[in-house]
Image: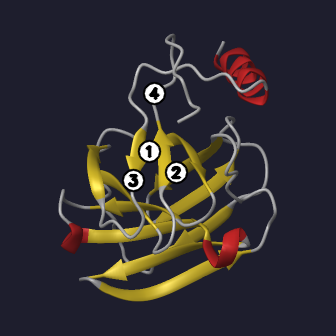
């Protein structure tokens, strides 16, 4: 059933239609992390993102910016790269990157991305199916990583939009 639902959502997104029981979160350019969401009982989240470049998803231990563990940047360098960065006590310690064309933003429509955190690793892949397609992965050197919150920000130049919790209500995505 989940595969059928994902196929339906992919078809609808290709037609420019989106279903959601959640608000679209608009994040202005150069904003700090906002919209902290509790993800403590989850291992992954399907995030739909629309923007020209510079969408950032942060994974945190607590609902404050000083507890940042991982940062996923989609659409870096004019939408040509994606990064996953690891932070330890507020300091950047490690990074992986890719220039894969499938891991880019679309300024004209929402694009789905699976973000998964499991044990000491974080993964991101495009699309609505968690285990298909190319992925970018970063594994921490830490023995344990406690991701409890997810938050969002934009890059320095342009705003981005995020959407979650797809279900049964049409949302106007033209604004």
Tell which tag, 3 or 2, sits nearer the viewer.
Answer: 3
The alpha-carbon separation of the residues under discs 4 and 3 comes to 18 Å
Rounded to the nearest angstrom, the CA distance separating label 3 from label 2 is 22 Å
Task: Choose the circle earlier in sequence order: 4 or 1.
Answer: 1
SS of the residue at dot 1?
loop
In the figure, 126 relative to 139: above or below?
A: above
* Marks 1,2: beta carbons within 8 A: yes
| Disc 2 to disc 4, C-alpha distance | 15 Å
Dot 1 or dot 2: first in sequence order is 1
Which dot, 2 or 4, sits closer to the camera? 4
Write the residue at 59% across / 73% down: 83
Q: Earlier in the sequence, mark 3 or mark 2?
A: 3
Q: Residue at x 58, y 59 (%)?
A: 123
Q: Give SS at disc 4.
A: loop
**Which sits in the foreground, 152 or 137?**
152
N-terminal of the two: label 3 or label 1? 3
Tell which tag, 4 or 3, sits nearer the viewer.
Answer: 3
On residue 43, the disc is 1
Disc 3 element: strand
As drawn, the residue found furthest toward the front would be: 175
Give the residue at x 43% y 77%: 86
Give the vertical position of 171 relative to 14 (above or below): above
The x, y position of residue 167, in whole percent, is 51, 16
Neighbours of disc 2 within 10 Å: few (<14), some (14-19), many (20+): some
Pointer 4: what residue?
165
Q: State the residue position of label 2.
A: 116
Q: Which residue is mark 3?
A: 27
């Amino acid at each position: 059933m989940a595969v059928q639902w994902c196929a339906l959502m992919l078809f609808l997104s290709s037609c420019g239609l989106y279903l959601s029981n959640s608000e679209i979160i608009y994040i202005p350019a150069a904003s700090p992390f906002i919209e902290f969401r509790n993800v403590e009982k989850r291992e992954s989240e399907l995030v739909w993102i629309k923007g020209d470049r510079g969408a950032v998803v942060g994974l945190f231990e607590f609902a404050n910016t000083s507890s940042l563990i991982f940062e996923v940047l989609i659409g870096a360098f004019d939408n040509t790269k994606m990064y996953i960065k690891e932070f330890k006590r507020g300091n950047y310690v490690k990074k992986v990157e890719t220039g894969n064309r499938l891991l880019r933003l679309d300024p004209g429509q929402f694009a789905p991305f699976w973000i998964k955190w499991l044990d000491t690793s974080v993964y991101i892949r495009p699309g609505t199916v968690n285990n298909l397609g190319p992925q970018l992965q970063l594994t921490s050197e830490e023995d344990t990583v406690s991701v409890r919150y997810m938050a969002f920000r934009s890059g320095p130049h342009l705003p981005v939009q995020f959407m979650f919790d797809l279900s049964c209500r049409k949302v106007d995505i033209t604004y």
